[in-house]
Image (tube, coloured by chain):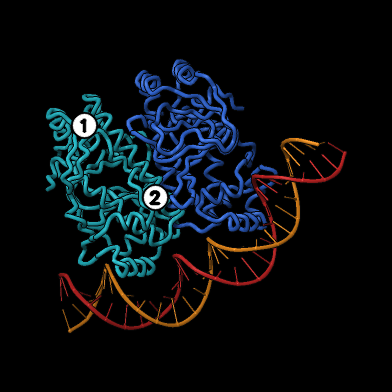
Chain colours: A cyan, B blue, C orange, D red
Amino acid sequence: MLNADNVLAQKLSYFTRLSPDETAAVDQAADGLTRALPAKRDLIREGDPPHAVFLITAGWACRYKTLADGRRQIVAFLLPGDLCDVNNHVLRAMDHAIGALTPIQYVEIGHDRLSTLAQGSSRIGQALWWRMLVNVAVQREWTLNNGQRSALERIGHLFCELYYRLRCVGLTSGTGYAFPLTQNDLAEATGLTPVHVNRTLQEMRATGLIVLKERMLDIPDLELLEDTVLFNPDYLHLQEEGRRVLPERSDARIGR
Amino acid sequence: MLNADNVLAQKLSYFTRLSPDETAAVDQAADGLTRALPAKRDLIREGDPPHAVFLITAGWACRYKTLADGRRQIVAFLLPGDLCDVNNHVLRAMDHAIGALTPIQYVEIGHDRLSTLAQGSSRIGQALWWRMLVNVAVQREWTLNNGQRSALERIGHLFCELYYRLRCVGLTSGTGYAFPLTQNDLAEATGLTPVHVNRTLQEMRATGLIVLKERMLDIPDLELLEDTVLFNPDYLHLQEEGRRVLPERSDARIGR
DNA sequence: CGCCTAGTTGATTTAAGTCAATATAGGTGG
DNA sequence: CCACCTATATTGACTTAAATCAACTAGGCG
């Protein structure tokens, strides 16, 4: 299972195989004080000057934006192993907030420390770029999601994305995963109303696409769900040269 | 006005003042062969391996994604001075296409050349990071746009964004700018149908928010439009230490 | 126990989509 | 220079997915 000390190395190793030295370097860069934040608190608020990079080690957080009239949009979920805001110190102020959806644990990594890490190994540098680029790719996919898809597609698509992302860091069990989001969170992420999310979830349950109860989400037939909502995992760029193995499967394959 | 040779330097100088040497280095990196592409052609297709970085020097292009059933979403506009896909060579395949909306001109810049440029001057390196981070910020704003805003707000918000972005590279004239997008392009960018875009534009014209005819968009009262659609330019991160001056205005101010 | 959050349900409204026809403006070839 | 063609824009009639409003239920817990 997941060890808070090495989520980052685990995640980066999805892109490229890291040597023991490199793994150690990554672990060391992320060995700072683990901090905790209760659910519903903000890690950073909009307008704040960005200071350090955060590495989420446990729990779920999100980036969100708020309009003047109170409408809120969750624009990204931050899961264990996710690094926020690499190099964002070049900007003067945050244009969005980061909030904890569940109690979270995180460590702060200084900008200098991270750039030293990146410069010390070109593979680590590339892996960090990979994370950055995938984050943008996910953001583009969310733009598509909110722009083109129906309610059922939006929600189903998100479920698929979260499945792949959690599997990378060992947070799935079989075909399901612990799912802490409320229907309201889902609504804010998908641009729907909570009422409509509720009805859509019922429809997905009724057709057997998902089993969602007691904060556990199970996707009995991932392929079926992917086909139903037109999900294509390419944008997550997981098929890289690193460990291609997806933890829950046994068809291990190494190298290119 | 705009000189194709220095769009990039012009754009980067919005973030930080560049010395003559730095400006020259930027110009030199972008001095490759200028290529041309007619409207409606793809610069890169989804699935292609990314090769070089493109710098758009003239014309409008877009990033777009297509669903299996044909729905299309424009996820970003690429305007003169925009750099596509810095460091994207770490990914194996494009997860979206880039297409020309008008005839465009562009130059290709090799990855190595760009990283040499970035390493040669920390200010240039930071300015390139700034572009990267702003692109993500814009993508987040688009997620919000498609998720939370009404048709009028989406379109109006886009008009404001384009105004600010074009002004940076000297492509506005007074309160307006040349606007080559069709109503269909607008529909694909905002997640609306062309018919609804048409009706919404008429409403915006009727209330005097915009004047749009003969491929020219004029925003007689930018502040009014911004207030109406809840536009806040902070996410474009233009207020940096560089030239704060906005070309069309005379209140020049230098340094911090 | 009572309060708060999260989830559910029903009735109704509405913004936007759909379908289909028509208008208009450039651009091209004869 | 005109006739035609295609892409773009416009209009009207109608449908629909999702929003809205308003109760109401079910847990969890101080």
Q: Image point 66% across, 42% down: which residue?
A: B216
**Amino acid type, label 2:** Trp
Which type of secondary structure does the marked residue at label 1 adopt?
Answer: loop
**Residue B203 x/y as whole percent:** 63, 58
Q: Earlier in the sequence, mark 1 or mark 2?
A: 2
Q: Image point 22% across, 34% down: which residue?
A: A242
> Is residue B172 positioned above or below B204 on the image?
above
> Is residue A226 positioned above or below B50 on the image?
below
Subunit of label 1: A
> Is residue A11 positioned above or below B254 on the image?
below
Dot 1: within a 10 Å radius of its alpha carbon, few (fewer than 14), some, or many (20 or more) residues?
few
Residue B250 appears left or right of B93: right
**Amino acid type, label 1:** Gly
Dot 2: within a 10 Å radius of its alpha carbon, few (fewer than 14), some, or many (20 or more) residues?
many
Subunit of label 2: A
**Residue B179 x/y as whole percent:** 62, 41
Q: Image point 54% across, 46% down: which residue?
A: B160
Q: Nearer the viewer, residue B220 or B96?
A: B96
Q: Nearer the viewer, residue A233 or B127?
A: A233
Q: Nearer the viewer, residue B50 or B150?
A: B50
Circle 1 residue: A255
Q: Which mark is residue A142?
A: 2
Image quadrant where one finds the C terminus of chain B: top left
Residue A70 seen anywhere in this rendered image of the structure: no
- In the picture, residue B255 is in which quadrant? top left
Q: Which mark is residue B102?
A: none
